[in-house]
Image (spheres, rainbow, N blue to C red):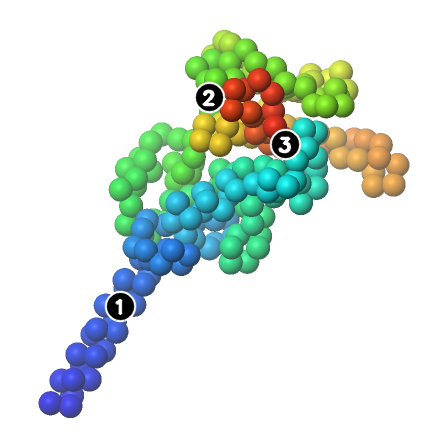
Amino acid sequence: QINTERSSVKTEHMEMSDTDDECCQICLLPKAKLTMPCGHSACQDCLERIFLHTNPQYRSNSLNDSEEAIVSLCPTRGKCPFCRAMVNMFDLKFDLGSRTENIKQCLDPDPDPFLVYSTMDDFSVSPLSGASYRDREGTVSIFFPTDEREEPFMVKNENKIYFHHNVHYHGKSKTFSGSFDCYKKDNESSENIGNTESCEVIMQFSSDYRFFAHGAIS
């Protein structure tokens, strides 16, 4: 009888552990989980609540480049709630170890079919079609095409720069994110040193899309 009780307790413990593995570590509910680049995971509702949050006390209509500005001003950017690593929401992937109704999206012919948020290929059908925006200093302007064959581009210091193809637009938060090639600068002289690196623009627009509320260049 004692052995039977021990076996029953062990089985019950194993069932509880299996259930815990399927639960989000933040809300503790049995939901499908998404994985961050740092390796930690949580459900989509909790992660969006973290990454779409902005600090209402931190306001600027210039494109800042500090980590504080990026986290405070830019929806879709934030820190992992477990290790505090910087995370781009558009890098979230389906956790194939958990059950998810959206797993069928992994069969789509996408460059990375496990990504949760797909890239924006045609801005002509978006609310940004034909729009242009300029920062407060007038040094950076961004233009969105009306033709599906064209790509959005930026004019900075009179140089026309096209964004890479992996641009994103998140309608819920009205946020645009696009990367481009920029020259590395010498830390002391601030002059270009010849080599290029990938930089990124993140912008959140006003509710009527007449202006961008804030953003950052990272």
Q: Dot 3 lies on which element?
A: strand
* Residue position marked by numbered label 2 in the rendering: 121
Taking the image as shown, residue 8 lies to the left or right of residue 137, namely: left
Taking the image as shown, residue 67 lies to the left or right of residue 119, namely: right
Pinpoint residue 203: horizontal percent, then vertical percent.
Answer: 59, 29
* Residue position marked by numbered label 3 in the rendering: 215
Counting residues from the start of the chain, the first of labels 2 and 1 encountered is 1
Pinpoint residue 115: horizontal percent, then vertical percent.
Answer: 42, 38
The answer to which of 194 and 71 lies nearer the viewer is 71
Report if residue 122 is visible in the image: no
Image quadrant assignment for residue 191? top right
Image quadrant assignment for residue 145? top right
Q: In this view, does 122 lie above or below 80?
A: above
Image quadrant assignment for residue 30? bottom left
User: Does the CB distance between marks 3 and 1 fall below 8 Å?
Assistant: no
Three-letter amino acid code of the residue under disc 1: Met
* Residue position marked by numbered label 1 in the rendering: 16
Marks 2 and 1, how far apart in space? Answer: 44 Å
Q: Nearer the viewer, mark 2 or mark 1?
A: 1
Marks 3 and 1, how far apart in space? Answer: 44 Å
Pinpoint residue 128: horizontal percent, then vertical percent.
Answer: 52, 17
